[in-house]
Amino acid sequence: MPHGSELEEKLGATEKAARVWAGPILTAALIVAADHLTKYLARTSLQPGKRVDILGDFLGFQLVFNPGAALSLGSGATRLITIFALIVCLGIIPWMLTRRLSTLSRIGISAIWGGAIGNLIDRIFFPPGALAGHVVDFIAYANWFVGNVADIAIVVGVGILLLQALRPHPDSEAASPESSAEDQ
């Protein structure tokens, strides 16, 4: 049985892990819930291919079942896209979240994670099935493309990460010659 200090260390590590994972899991879960609620509403309210204008030709609703990735790219490689999405959702993103990150970077990665999971669920469970399911898209942006809430979360997450990457960080400032000599 662990002694007092060992038990406190284990409890401290558990509390730290809970703090590290609570925000990303909650963020991703809320995105997945919003994505699938809106996809359900789209599937039950819209007719495939028929556009309903909201802001003229600029924005509307149009139910589309997308076998590919963004902008329907790779529509002949749905299973490959699904396998890649599984690797990202179950391996790469969780690994990234174990790294030391700023709060904004954690939010960005969590948004990407939620969006990726939302679309992955479609690929696994929607027709035609067998890891080749089509993603439900319903937000029509002019005549450019049709997307969904998961896509919005991914774009926002990437945007946050780009802003973070372009922002100057005090940690990355080059050390002055005096501090380098003092550190040695």
Image (cartoon, rainbow, N blue to C red):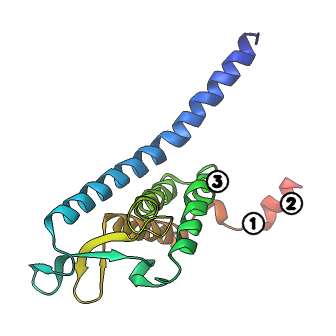
Residue 157 sits in quarter: bottom left
> Seen in the image, is 177 located left or right of residue 109?
right
Disc 1 crowd rating (10 Å Cα; few below 14, some 14-19, many 20+) is few
> Seen in the image, is 15 located left or right of residue 60?
right
Q: Position of residue 93 (x, y in %)?
A: 58, 57
Q: Position of residue 144 (x, y in %)?
A: 29, 88
Q: Secondary structure at mark 2?
A: helix
| Mark sitting on residue 176 | 1
Residue 16 sits in quarter: top right
Disc 2 crowd rating (10 Å Cα; few below 14, some 14-19, many 20+) is few
Of discs 2 and 3, which sits in the foreground?
3
Q: Nearer the viewer, residue 127 or 17?
A: 127
**Distance (Cα) linking label 2 and label 1:** 9 Å
Name the kind of residue labelled 3 in the image. Answer: Trp
Residue 61 sits in quarter: bottom left
Query: Counting residues from the N terminus, which is met first, the one under dot 3 or under dot 1?
Result: 3
Name the kind of residue labelled 1 in the image. Answer: Ser
> In the rendered image, which residue does mark 3 sit on?
95
Point out the image quarter for the C terminus: bottom right
Residues at marks 3 and 1 touching, judged by CB atoms closer than 8 Å: no
Q: Position of residue 18 (x, y in %)?
A: 54, 34
Q: Position of residue 122 (x, y in %)?
A: 40, 62
Q: Is residue 157 above or below residue 19?
A: below
| Mark sitting on residue 181 | 2
